[in-house]
Image: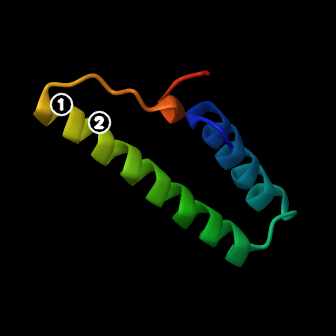
Amino acid sequence: MKNVTELTAELARVFKGIEDGTIDLKKATEMNNSAGKIINAQRLLLETAALNKSKVTNTFLTEK
């Protein structure tokens, strides 16, 4: 996954898999846990940029 849009699509796929029973709940739990860690890391980058009054140059948050 290259950006936040792809992460969102993957999480939607996981949700659908849980709903229709095609994804094992243990695997879905680990995937959601990993996604949460990625999101928290991105949040930290945004907060750091805000504190430093600098521009965020992280390509994960863009559509590039």
Name the residue beneath numbered marker 2: 46
* Amino acid type, label 2: Leu
* Residue beneath the point at 33% across and 27% down: 56
- Name the spot of residue 50 as percent of width and height, x first: 18, 31
9 lies left or right of 53: right
* Residue beneath the point at 39% across and 27% down: 57
Colour scheme in the image? Answer: rainbow
* Residue beneath the point at 62% across and 70% down: 29
**Mark pair 2, 1: CA separation:** 6 Å
Q: Quadrant of residue 42?
A: top left
Say above or below: 21 vs 6. Answer: below
Name the residue beneath numbered marker 1: 50
Q: Quadrant of residue 43?
A: top left
Tell which residue pokes out farthest to the bottom in this image: 26
Say above or below: 40 vs 4. Answer: below
Say above or below: 55 vs 4. Answer: above
Which residue occupies the foreground of this view, 20 or 37? Answer: 37
- Name the spot of residue 4 as percent of width and height, x first: 56, 35
